[in-house]
Image (cartoon, grey):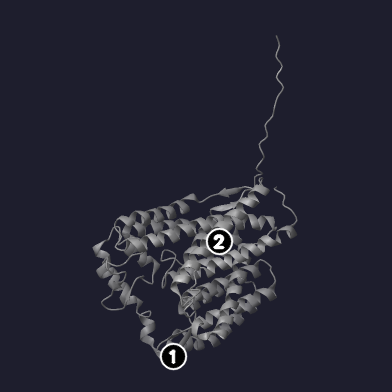
Amino acid sequence: MIKSENKKTYQWLLIILIVIMALRICSYFTLFPNSIGVTRVVKVGMRFLLSGFSIFILFFLKKKHSNFSFEYSNHLSGLFYLAYALLGVASILWSTDVMFTVLQLMMLFESMVFVWAFYHLMVMGDFLTKGRASFAKILGVSVAIISVGFLIGLYNDPSTFYRDTHGGAVSRLGGFIINPNELGMLAVIGASMTYVRMREGASISWNIIFWGLSVAVLLLTQSRSSLGAFMLVTLMFILMSKSAWLKIGTFGAGVLILPILIKTIIIKDGDVGEVMSMTGRLPFWSDLITYGFPDRPLLGYGFMSISPSPFSNKFDSIHAYAASMTHNTFVQVLINLGLVGAFICIVQMTLTFVAIGKTENTKLRLTAIAMLIPVLINSATEFGIFGEANYGIYFYHLIMLMFIISKSEKIKKKRRRLYDRTVFIQ
């Protein structure tokens, strides 16, 4: 077995991993709502700096611990995702919005490079800190820090951090910084990681605090899809518990709280019709598939482009609104990369699910499922794992790599040249 130095030596690595994770998530926020130009420069600059820094730290640690090595498995999952990305590159030739396609491809490939380096760094960091830098811990603490930032921002600048909808009758946390549904998904992932950590035997008190911060943000976003994801994840962990009293108590609390949630969050402003149409999404999807898809069924309109016209970046729906994205990652793939792209993505997701199901690492499987539930539910209503650049894609990349990259159990021996004396006999 490979030996590592005392874990105290690498406490700085745990802090660095949390900071990188938190900053990477923040790089998807509109950090300067009053200046789109400054926001773009900061976001792009932050992402490239984090990628470069992660690669630098990884090479530094690899040089210092040259006997540490990685193992790779489930290659097909990664190869099919690469095929999806390469089809996107090819779609530049027929895209109805070439500049937007190129921009989205650049961000996709940058994300792939970053995650490849960063996940290697997390695997190595978990080993060097003797398990103190687990994936769930890094992600859970990062989301808790971001949650504190949003709660402070809400108190200091509510006009920026709150978004009024339904004619001002409903206020949702996220404001001009991030889509409330996307923030809700992030909050659910944060809460999910506290469940994983508590099952690992981590500090109950700290994780309850982190859980409380995530749930507070979730409720303030008033995201119905994220609330559903939270209830599913919570139910999953409750059913896994051996405590009968915990199950009974949760059921009782659910009966009491559910009517309040239905009244305040699910049916906003008493509009049942809005719920039934999924806030206008159902007629929009119907128009996309009925009128947009038949024009280019095989290869679509180009990577992240759903508009039939080169003069507009939006699809003008007959029965709903006009939009540049479908609010459903699976419909998005079908429209922008056609049946070919949809087939590649379905196979890729199937391979990822198979990898999750067959792994013998139950801790890793549980972490992946706890992340997948909110990510996939969000993908059905927002940008999603195959949509425009967002941290849902970033999380899906991490989930994939959980089952592709791991620490090798074999010792990598250093090569040494042996100089033998040669005796010449005359």
Residue 415 lies, with reference to residue 326, above or below; the image says: above
Can residue 357 be seen in the rendering of this structure?
no
Can residue 297 be seen in the rendering of this structure?
yes
Mark 2 is surrounded, within 10 Å at the Cα level, by few (under 14), some (14 to 19) or many (20 or more) other residues, namely some
The local secondary structure at tag 2 comes to helix
Rendered location of residue 193, percent (x, y)? 59, 69
The local secondary structure at tag 1 comes to loop
Rendered location of residue 204, percent (x, y)? 69, 74
Judge depth for marks 2 and 1 and give the one in front.
2
Which quadrant, please, contains the C terminus?
A: top right
Mark 1 is surrounded, within 10 Å at the Cα level, by few (under 14), some (14 to 19) or many (20 or more) other residues, namely few
Of residue 84 and residue 108, the one placed in the foreground of this image is 108
Quarter of the figure with residue 331: bottom left
How far separated are the C-alphas under marks 2 and 1? 40 Å
Q: Which mark is residue 100?
A: none
Q: Residue at x 67, y 31 (%)?
A: 417
Residue 134 lies, with reference to residue 418, above or below; the image says: below
What's under tag 2, amino acid-wise? Leu
Q: Residue at x 47, y 71 (%)?
A: 38
Q: On the rendered structure, is 75 left or right of 133?
A: left
Residue 225 lies, with reference to residue 197, above or below; the image says: below
Name the residue carrying label 2.
Answer: 50
Quarter of the figure with residue 130: bottom right
Rendered location of residue 16, percent (x, y)? 64, 63
- Which comes before the other along the chain, label 2 or label 1? 2
Q: On the rendered structure, is 168 left or right of 257?
A: left
What's under tag 1, amino acid-wise? Ala
Name the residue carrying label 1.
Answer: 169
| Residue found farthest to the top | 426
Q: On the rendered structure, is 326 left or right of 297?
A: right
Tell whether label 1 touches label 2 (CB within 8 Å). no
Rendered location of residue 41, percent (x, y)? 48, 67
